[in-house]
Image (cartoon, rainbow, N blue to C red):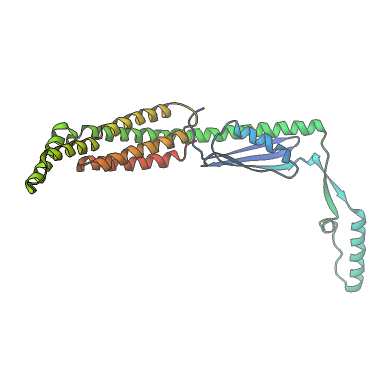
Amino acid sequence: MALQSMTGFSREDHTSSFGSWVWELRSVNGKGLDIRLRLPNGMEELDAEVRKVIGASLKRGNVQASLQFQKSADAEKPIVNEKLAQELWDVAEKLQRQFGGDMPSISELMGIRGVVEIEETDLSDEDRAARKVELLDSLKRAVEELVSVREKEGAAIADVLVQQVAKIEELRIGIDANEARSEANIRARLAAQVKQLIDASSGLDEQRLHQEAVILAAKADLQEEIDRLAVHVASANEMLAGKGPIGRKMDFLAQEFNRECNTICSKSNDAGVTTLGLDMKIVIDQFREQIQNME
């Protein structure tokens, strides 16, 4: 199964000896698979099988499925309530004699509620089963079209995600290669800070200051976060090159990206590194927004 977005629309029209009908499917973002059905009266028995057909192809998204059904002419016959029609005609004649005016036409009389009713011809068990097969087959075509739409949008989103992951990797490399992170620069910066403290007060223990400086240097080291970012980038690229639902996994990965980036920004003691970290955070936020649309 190719990568899919969770948004899409499909429509399937079908005509047969049983009548004509239209399936419409709409899908939007959702945490899981939530299927809402709207079926005509008398077709509630389809509910479980419709959900099964949709669930076989979709794993996430809020899906609305509706069926509009029009029976064939052979499936219905008019029943005339002749007694009611005669009574209405008699009343009309009486009113005409009393007040004058025109008598109603036959079409007007038949249009009065209750004079003509439409009765559905009972289907045999075999015909009912055959109609059910046709209804579900047309539903499957509608689902296939919806999947195709979701896959096309999923491919477009995946292209954007690939670019964003590449940008995260570019910024990660920039942070890793920043001159401020070199051992010599860190040593020189700490030495200068220690010297300033010693010059400011002769009562400070120089040995103690050096020990504290070593501890601070260890805490400020970004290598662990940079290495973890590299692992997350590789995982993201592997998912995007694969198939099947990845939305939940990518959402977790986005949280990991964000955690490492936040740590880098909080540890950074260089403006250049901080700027790269903030730029990365913007890309990660954009990345998280896009994956909300992925199945």
Q: Is residue 88 above or below residue 61?
A: below
Q: Is residue 222 above or below residue 120?
A: above
Residue name at image x 72 percent, y 43 percent: 70
The one of 139 and 86 positioned closer to us in this rendering: 139
Q: Viewed as shown, does residue 20 lie left or right of 120?
A: left
Residue name at image x 42 percent, y 29 percent: 240
Q: Viewed as shown, does residue 130 lie left or right of 259?
A: right
Q: Viewed as shown, does residue 182 lie left or right of 56?
A: left
The one of 22 and 279 positioned closer to us in this rendering: 279
Residue 35 pos. (x, y %): 60, 40
**Residue ranking furthest to the bottom:** 99
The one of 76 and 293 positioned closer to us in this rendering: 293
Res 145 quadrant in image:
top right
Residue 113 pos. (x, y %): 82, 57
Residue 57 pos. (x, y %): 57, 31
Q: Viewed as shown, does residue 129 lie left or right of 205?
A: right
How many numbered marks, from 0 up?
A: 0
Residue 284 pos. (x, y %): 35, 40
The one of 286 and 210 positioned closer to us in this rendering: 210
Residue name at image x 67 percent, y 31 percent: 137
